Every structure is written in structure tokens, then in C-alpha cells.
Amino acid sequence: MENAVLKEIQPMSLQNHPGINYENLFNYSTMQHDIVAHVLTLGFVAHAAGLVYFAFAQKDIHPRLRTATIMSCFIMAAAALNLFRQFSSWNDAFTWQGSAYVMEQTFSNGFRYFNWFITLPLLLTQPMFVFGIKGKSFMRNTLIFVTASAVMVLTGYIGQMYEVTNPFLYWLWFILGSIAYVPLLVVLYRVYFVDRQKVPAHIEKLVKGLFYFQVAAWTIYLFAYLMPALSFTPNGVVTRHLLYTIADISSKFIYGVWLSYIALKISAEKGYQPAVEKLTALD
């Protein structure tokens, strides 16, 4: 009996330890625990499938545009490994105690941020290879993308370490990260609408649509980060991981497929025969 009581009160005592994510403060029903495990598995499988897709899609795209698809392979591999690690960490952290899943060891979202240090700069620079941006514009945009994304991810990483213990620092680091998000969006807009080479009229809508889709997908991450403030409950934790997984699949896999399709269309316009044949097969 004493051990059972200890397990009930132990999570709340973690509020005194900086670096603890709020996932660790609750016990979970079977459904709550399994939904998180299942969505993390879905994310892993989606990116593993994406790795195979992009590996085979390269041959149909013009060699000058192919770099973006190759980068998608690295993004898929990194994301799949991270989500598998998150899934394993979630299952290891909580153990069934007869009536609920109770924390046995801490769970951390920190792995996500170190993954984003790799994938976010790649995601940002990918369109420039498809849209033919070169020279000084490419170097300027890349510098801003890498710097702003590093600041944004770092501030997010630090901020989430205080989501339980210090609301002031949690919000401060969120605001600083949001400031870094602004130049990133400005430059991304330039890539899609100003610096890029002109594309055929029938591709224009695809390009514009991808920009708004990319921004919307990234915005989902903000709501996932803010879930401790929006819903400090076990259901809030479940919602957070649903949002993270939706954002992961949207901003990496679906975005990558969309961009590769644009690259395929441009390749066909350039007269690249494999792209022409692929589009003919799809029609």
C-alpha cells in the first residue's frame, strides 16, 4: 500500500526539477497511453515509407533539381529515427500498475529539438534547389535560414525545460523563438515569390499552395509547444503528441512529396524524358 501511494504522489514532486516535461506529471489510462504510442508509431512508419519513396523518386527528376529529393531522404531517415526513439522512450517511461500507466523513468521531448537542428535547415533550403535560386541569393538565404532556425530550435529547447517549473522562463524563451521565426518566414516568402525563377503558369498555383501549406504545418508545432499552457491534463499530453505527429508528417513527408511533384513538373517542362514519362503514367 505504501508503495502504491508513493507512486501516486511521485509525479507531482517532479515539478521542483527543471528540465521535466509535463508528460511526466500524470498517470494515464490504457487509451491515453496507447494513443500516444500509436501516433508515434504512425509518424515513424510514415517517414520510413517516405525514405523509400524519395529514394525511388529521384530517377524521374532532372539532375539539376534532384538535390531537393536527396535531402528529403536524409530528412525522412532522421525523422524516422527520432520518432522511433520517442516511441521507445514513451513505452519505457510508463508501466502498467493495474489501474493506470505510471511513470517509472522520465520521458523527454528534447530529442525532437536536436532532430530539428538537422532537419529544419534542410527543409528550408530544399525549395531553392527546385526553384533555381543560386549565387548570392542562395548564400544569403541559406545563412538566414540556418541562423534563424538554430535560434528558434535552441530557444524552444530551453523553453520546454521550464514548462513545469517556471512559467516566466517558459514564455520568455517562447517569445524569443517566435521573434526568430519572423525573419525565417520573410526569407521563405522571398524564396517562393521573389527570388525564384519563373515557373510555367500551370505550376504557379502548386508553388503558392506549398508555401501556405508549409507555414500552416509549422504553426501546428507552436500549438504543440503551448499545450502545457492550454491543457495541463493527461488529455492535453495526448493532444500534444497528436499535434506533433500531424506536424511532423505534414511538414516533412507531405511537404516533400508536394515539392518533389513540383520538381517533376519543372523537369518535364525542361524536356527531361523520365519526368515526361512519369507524368504521362500518372495522368
Image (cartoon, helix red, strand yellow):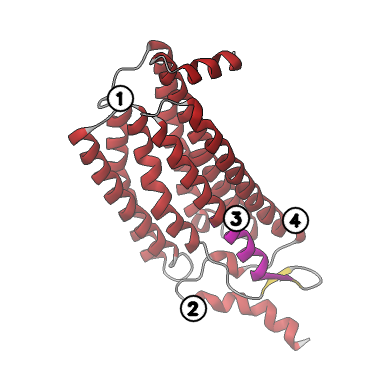
Quarter of the image where the C terminus is located: top right
Contact between marks 3 and 4 (CB within 8 A): the answer is: no
Determine whether 258 is above or below 23 in the image.
Answer: above
| Residue 239 placement (x, y as % from top left) | 60, 51
Determine whether 276 is above or below 211 in the image.
Answer: above
The residue labelled by disc 3 is 236
Q: Which mark is residue 193?
A: 1
| Mark 4 nearby-residue class (10 Å; few <14, some 14–19, many ≥20) | few
Contact between marks 2 and 1 (CB within 8 A): the answer is: no
Determine whether 109 is above or below 255 in the image.
Answer: below
The magenta stretch is: 82-95
| Mark 3 nearby-residue class (10 Å; few <14, some 14–19, many ≥20) | some
| Mark 1 nearby-residue class (10 Å; few <14, some 14–19, many ≥20) | some
Name the N-terminal-most of marks 3 and 2: 2
Contact between marks 3 and 2 (CB within 8 A): the answer is: no
Q: Is residue 225 left or right of residue 98?
A: left
Disc 2 and disc 4: Cα gap in Å?
28 Å
| Mark 2 nearby-residue class (10 Å; few <14, some 14–19, many ≥20) | few
Give the residue at x 34% y 32%.
129
The residue labelled by disc 4 is 31
The amino acid marked with disc number 4 is: Met
Give the residue at x 21% y 40%.
140
Residue 87 belongs to the span the image colors magenta: yes
Q: Nearer the viewer, mark 2 or mark 1?
A: 1
Disc 1 and disc 4: Cα gap in Å?
45 Å
Q: Quadrant of residue 117?
A: bottom left
Residue 41 belongs to the span the image colors magenta: no
The residue labelled by disc 2 is 16
The amino acid marked with disc number 2 is: Asn
Give the residue at x 70% y 59%.
33
Secondary structure of residue under mark 1: helix
Q: Nearer the viewer, mark 1 or mark 4?
A: 1
